[in-house]
Amino acid sequence: MQLAEMYNYIRSFSTQHIVPRVCIIGAGPAGFYAAQQLLKTSADIKVDILEKLPVPYGLVRFGVAPDHPEVKNVIHTFEKTASNPRFQFIGNVNVGKDVTIKELQEIYHAVLLTYGAEEDKLLNIPGENLNNIISGRRFVGWYNGVPADSNLNINLDVEEAVILGQGNVAIDIARILLTPVDKLRNTDITSFALEKLSKSKIRKVSLIGRRGPLQAAFTIAELREILKLDGCKTCWRVDDFTNVNQVVNTLARPRKRLTALMLEYLEKTSSDTEAMTKRLYPIFLRSPVEFLGSDTVHSIKLSVNSLEGNDVSTQFAVPTGLFEEIECGLAFRSIGYKSVQIDASIPFDIKIGRVKNIAGKVQDKLYAAGWVATGPVGVILSTMTNAFQIGTLMSKELPLTENKPGFVGLSKILAQKGIPIVLYNDWKKIDKIECERGKILGKPREKIVDINEMLEIALK
């Protein structure tokens, strides 16, 4: 036997009993897709996915609009991953508090951060602390059953609302406010949100963006859906579309289709306008500068903007010195999300709200994927692509020099602190009760929002 062969034999013999163990923090799409890829690329790897809440799926459960059930079909893929005997879901574990990153690095071969972006960006303008100025993220959490958002203090007993931001989340918020409540009754929207929306007096929603129609962040599918909403008319401002006709044919196909749809509806006048009791006003080239009101917001002061730059995709808004004021009794801030530093040992960029990483690698044996790594960009498909890439990278770099205790070591740490854990079969008990309660109400499920109730069901 030659020296090289002998070395390979000894190396193979010495590592053949080492089981690679990976810990993923965050059970949303990025976490599940990364787990899927890790399990696929290695025949013996064991993957544990930790989640702060007792329930899995992150933004698929808590971010997808209730009237978009088809988007939640990815859960079937996640369930397939969860059925793999080398995978384990461990809920009700608050990493950074119940267990530290350094402790996890000692008991696992690698740690992957996929805990998403759980805070929203602030506008930092005067009057932002007035009553009925609502975080768009918290409003979505309120109607989608996020436990921390179930007590949201919102007054819908007003006629005019503004949404600052023009991304898909902003359109989701507008659609939920403007959709006939009967259309929401058979969705998994929370019952308390449905009850409050059924008494809503909101008739006018303004969707405000600082740039123009050519830079709008919503997708064509989201726009088309709200344009066809029953009982609601979309009212465009013709001046916002000056010179847009001249450049539409030069745009890349997705942007061209989106712009053409806006232009089509700009020219279209409804013959049934009187029957439409609600209005959506997409407003471009405006930036919020101040909320006005004594205790509660009653209007918003906007800067009138113009665009600078030759490339329409990168044009930026500059104030003209002119202002406009719009009345509103309710305002939503929907200008993007940011991540938080859950553990002091994580290299973190506080300014942009993101884990510092290079192509998913944070440091030796520590990785990041999804929004915590990339920022809140893209949709589930782009998160999947990113998570697959990081999963592949981790598989190549796993340091298999010694066995690690993995879940056994984690269980000891949590047991010493008296932290109960929720495994996947325990979550299925919660899932079963939610579906049963939903069936009584004619809904796919009635989400439980009390964590103590979740634990009581899961652990009995």
Image: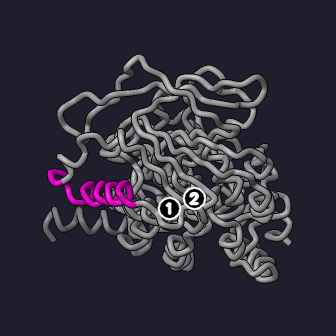
Q: Is 450 positioned to the left or the right of 52 in the image? A: right
Mark 1 or mark 2: name the one nearer the start of the chain: 2
Q: Which picture quadrant has residue 391? A: bottom left
The location of residue 258, given as percent across then percent down, is 32, 57
Can you tell which mark lies on residue 175? 2
Q: Against 117, is 458 above or below?
A: below
The residue positioned 43% from the left and 51% from the top of the image is: 369
The location of residue 233, given as percent across then percent down, is 53, 58
Q: Amino acid at mark 1?
A: Ile
Residue at mark 1: 226
Q: Is 203 positioned to the left or the right of 339 in the image? A: right
Coloration mode: one colour
Q: Which picture quadrant has residue 121? A: top right
Q: Which picture quadrant has residue 317? A: top left
Q: Which residues are magenta?
A: 249-268
Q: Is 108 positioned to the left or the right of 269 in the image? A: right
Secondary structure of the residue carrying tag 2 is helix
